[in-house]
Amino acid sequence: MKSITILFKSFFIILLFLFSNAFSDTLNKIEITGNDRISDETIRLFISVDIKDEIDEVKLNNILKDLYDTDFFKDISVEFDNQILSINVIENPIIENISYIGIKSNRILELIKDGTSIKQRSSYDERKIKNDKLKIKDILQAIGYYNASLDILVEQSKNNLVSITYDIDLGKKSKIKKITFIGNKVFKDKKLRRIITTTEYKFWKFISGKKFLNQNSVFLDERLLKNFYKNNGYYDVKINSSFAKLLDDNSFELIFNIDAGSKIYFGELDLKLPTDFDENNFSSIKKLFKKIKGDPYSINKIDDILDEIDSITTLEQYKFIKANVFETINQNTIDLKFHVEEGEKFYVDRINILGNTVTSESVIRNQLMLDEGDPFSKILVNKSINNLKRLNFFKTVNYKVLNNNENNTKSIEISVDEKPTGEIFASAGAGTSGASLGFGVKENNFLGKGIGLDSNILLSGESIKGKFSVTNPNFKNSDKTLFASVEAIENNYYKNFGYKTNKTGISIGTNFEYLNDFYVGINSSNFYEVIETNSTASAQQQAQEGNYWDSFIKLSMNYDKRNQKFQTSDGFKSHYSVDLPLISDTNTLKNYYNYSHYFDFFEKNFSSISIYLESAHSINNKDIKLSERITIPSNRLRGFEAGRLGPKDGDDFVGGNYAYSINVASNIPQIFEESQNIDFLIFADAADIWGVDYNSSLKGSGIRSSVGVALDWMSPVGPMNFTLAYPVTKEIGDKTETFRFNLGTTF
């Protein structure tokens, strides 16, 4: 009705303008009637005329249009006579309340509220109500509810108020019973199903991914399929269509129509540089060219070359460059020419941070590789975004680069979507000596300052360990990390080790990046310890009863060149630390080294080999304390209980002076190939521990080894890990642990 009224009145005004003598007169007075809730002053603000203005047909039409654009009125009449502008309005009702029936899920409810335009205390508009009905249906279909029905009830009350009720019947989610690929296919359906996120519905796939029809997921799947074909040589691939075929009332067949086109290969590859660039700096690019020539076309390999060019130019301080790729397509090959040229100089004018309601802006800016006033660099922007993602404070991190109109400057707009940063974690283990339980609470972004708080406790049949720590990763807005911790440990090792110890102390330290990806740390630790032995312990062990105060400095070095922290498929990580005694009765010097190398054998595979070395001995030739002796951690030798192998004094495990382990692990993605949240791994461990300073006759040498399988599941309540290990080689007296379980979640 409203639209008809607007059309009629607009048409009438146009007719007056065309067929009657045009009028124009001075406005001396404005009269407004019919308004109750909206004041005369507010209405005057919306119209584009004032007293003493000349009024004609065009201005009358603009007044009418401006007032209807406010959405405050359901009907408006405008007249101008005898220098008086008369405006009569009928106000739209105000929406007093909006309610939803049939929606129990808060997630779905939030999607509907965010996706619709009608809000509480806004003006009622019948057109917007009808549009919102269509939007809600689109939202529900996008998350799999294709059979949902919706009724909108509008209840008028006094004082020109209305209440709106959305009565929604979701029905059952539309299941995907079958996924089919038609057209010019060159890969097996089984292979293509592993590429996409959508999965076929099976009753046993309770932990699988997206098994319900979701339009957004289908769009994503199209992009994934296209990228997959393009990365395997099919340059001209087309996804002609993707559609859902209705099988019954509640199930669909999802069909992708693919035209792969012909397979093409990399031909000649060339690099053109500015004349003042040193070509020797780009030798790695030439090696890449030789390596990929003749390989199937791949957009990922092109991106790798461009990333390498960016890295080299940034390292060599070529601040204002751009790289373009020119393609020449032959019969079955494609020639590429990479042009590196000096571009226009741009500087960073402003960096705007959006979306951080909890996290302090200074915490975010500390992760940025460039600042306002610096030369603009795309690679540094990308590194900055990756730094923010690694904080794990945000669901998403996005950015936009805006070109300013003058002064050759760019503005960077970074938007973040914060997520809960607290963690609750638990662990459990079962072995021949009984069970162990662990519990902890952690906050990674305390008060939005990026400060980490961590408290945990570990309980077993023979020990209680508690620890509280505080970490500031950007102390005084620097790149240095400051941390402090308080720790208390009570170990009742009478049964298997012949002694009991109570240990309490504090540590404080710092670490920082000394070179690119190379970190140095230093911390001071002070501990008070009481050692007691039982009557069955040897004389050498009983001699170590007493009270000890130990103070030492730990120096550490870390070199991390992994491509990513989780599911790492390339690179390495190296760690070395040494404990230097300051105040100690035994003056124990400890060395620790660990090296891990990561690689992949095939697609979606990630494998690793790790080497661990540790030594402990007194620098003044005294016997080191029982509690300072080395034991093999359970994660270094799965299938064996921690500390319950190696040298023994009578019936007691006493640990050793030296130890090492070698660990190999690899996932097998084919076992859960259609699941996005489960990894199945196989592993093999080998380790040895030996040397007892007070009695060289105590032998514990002999390689222990184990093999096993592990399952990592990103469950709805958090990450879970299950380990099943089988000892292959062991010594008499070693104690085994076949099964281990770990659980973590967030709040």
Image: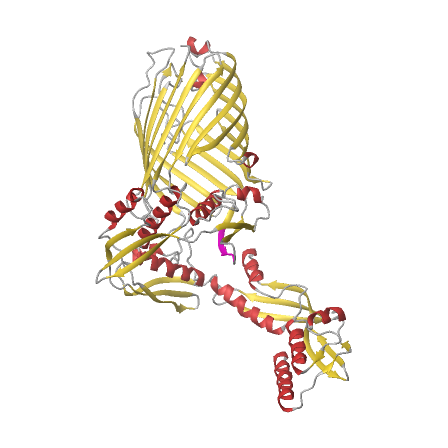
* Residue 512 image offset from top left, x and y in percent: 47, 32
In the image, residue 178 lies in the stretch drawn in magenta: no
In what quadrant of the picture does the C terminus appear? top right
- The residue furthest front is 276
Is 400 included in the stretch rendered in magenta? yes
Coordinates of residue 102 in the picture (x, y in percent): 57, 63
Closer to the camera in the image, 193 or 335: 335
Q: Quadrant of residue 169?
A: bottom right
Q: In this rendering, would 65 be left or right of 729?
A: right
Against 250, is 371 above or below? Answer: above
Q: Nearer the viewer, residue 570 or 218?
A: 570
Q: Is residue 357 above or below residue 12?
A: above
Magenta portion: prevailing SS class: strand
Image quadrant containing the N terminus: bottom right
Q: How many marks?
A: 0
Give x and y (percent) for residue 701. 31, 19
- Residue 742, quarter of the rendered image: top left
In the image, residue 467 above or below residue 350: above
Q: Estimate the x, y position of residue 196 in percent, counting from the top left.
A: 37, 57
Viewer can see residue 454: no
State the scheme by which the image is colored: secondary structure
Residue 19 in view of the camera: yes
User: What residue is shown at x 35% (from left), y 65% (from top)?
Assistant: 255
* Towards the viewer: 61 or 733: 61
Q: Which residues are magenta?
A: 396-404
